[in-house]
Amino acid sequence: EKYIGFHGAGGGGSMMSMDAVLKRGFKLANYCDTSGNPSASKVYRASKIILSQPDIRGYFASGSGVASQEQYHSARGMVKAFHEEKLSIPGVIRLGGNFEEKAVEILGNYLKDIPAKVEGYGRDDSPEFCAQRLEELIKENQSGYHEVKPVVDLVLPKNCYFFETLTGKLSIDHRKCTDCGTKGCIEACKAEILKLEDGKPVLSVSKEEAKKGKCTECLACEIFCTFHEQDAIFIHLPIPGLKEYRQKIVKK
Ligand code: SF4
Ligand code: SF4
């Protein structure tokens, strides 16, 4: 069967996008929509749930193409999810709308090293073209179907600096920061809630303020540190029920 995971953004654009893949003989394993200016953490969770389906052969994200939301948030959410899942099925991600160039750049820069080929597109690339690319990539892909992986319990290093965010927890392993040349997490944080103290990043606002939403869960600090520095930051974004759900799938 030609099942794919579907990740839309906006009802009308999603309908056009679904039509485009259905015309190529694909079947949709799910319908998921992250429109309405989603945070990177929300898109991350959506991707993780879509990638809990065992029989999919590709990942298709495509919405209206003219979304007013800042598309780089969606790109960062998918980068984190695809890396954690070690994605081995191809993906075509059409993130048309505000800051789409930056979104496509993020996908291109940070998804080079995963097993699967993932291509990013913008508003000038039609859903039909993107569906065609997905079909071509699936034909080239040898690994076939997506393999659902068990959820591994989080073990933070001892004495890690951490704070809670609106829906998760951000940890920084300060021991790694001594080898850091750029301290780039500070600039990456556009919410300006990180500052350096003895060469290590800490909150410049109170832990309560971070938890109430000053940390926007944009994932920018984690992605910067993972790919450009010492891999010291991890943002844990739990998904209730996912561990148990995947256990059932993996056992089958
Ligand atoms: S970029 Fe990473 S390694 Fe460098 S100071 Fe920030 S958290 Fe530490
Ligand atoms: S600390 Fe700053 S860069 Fe990191 S997730 Fe929170 S808001 Fe984003």
Image (cartoon, grey):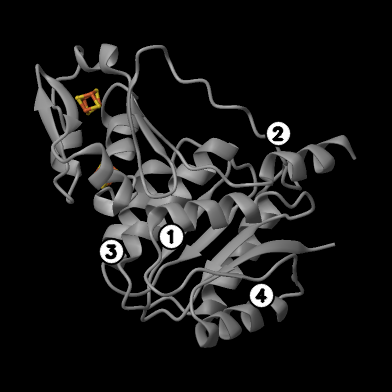
Does dot 1 land on a helix, a strand or a loop?
A: strand
- Distance, label 1 to label 4, CA atoms, is 16 Å
Disc 3 residue type (three-letter): Glu
Position of residue 202 in the picture relative to residue 136 (left or right): left
Q: Mark 4 points at which residue?
A: 21
Dot label at residue 150: 2
C-alpha gap between disc 4 and disc 3: 24 Å
Q: Name the residue under label 3.
A: 101
* Residue for point 20% across, 13% down: 179
Q: Residues within 10 Å of mark 2 (few under 14, many from 20)?
A: some
Amino acid type at mark 4: Val
Closer-to-camera residue (241/14) = 241
User: Which residue lies at the image location 33% right of the left edge and 39% below the top edge?
Assistant: 223
Residue 220 seen in render: no
Contact, mark 3 vs mark 1 (Cβ under 8 Å): no
Distance from label 3 to label 1 (Cα)? Answer: 9 Å
Label 1, on which residue?
Answer: 120
Say what secondary structure mark 4 lies in.
Answer: helix
Q: Say which label, 3 or 2, has the lower sequence index.
A: 3
Frontmost residue, 163 versus 87: 163
Q: Which one is in front in this view, the residue at disc 4 or the one at disc 2?
A: 2
Q: Where's the N terminus, which quadrant?
A: bottom right
Say which amino acid is labelled 2: Pro
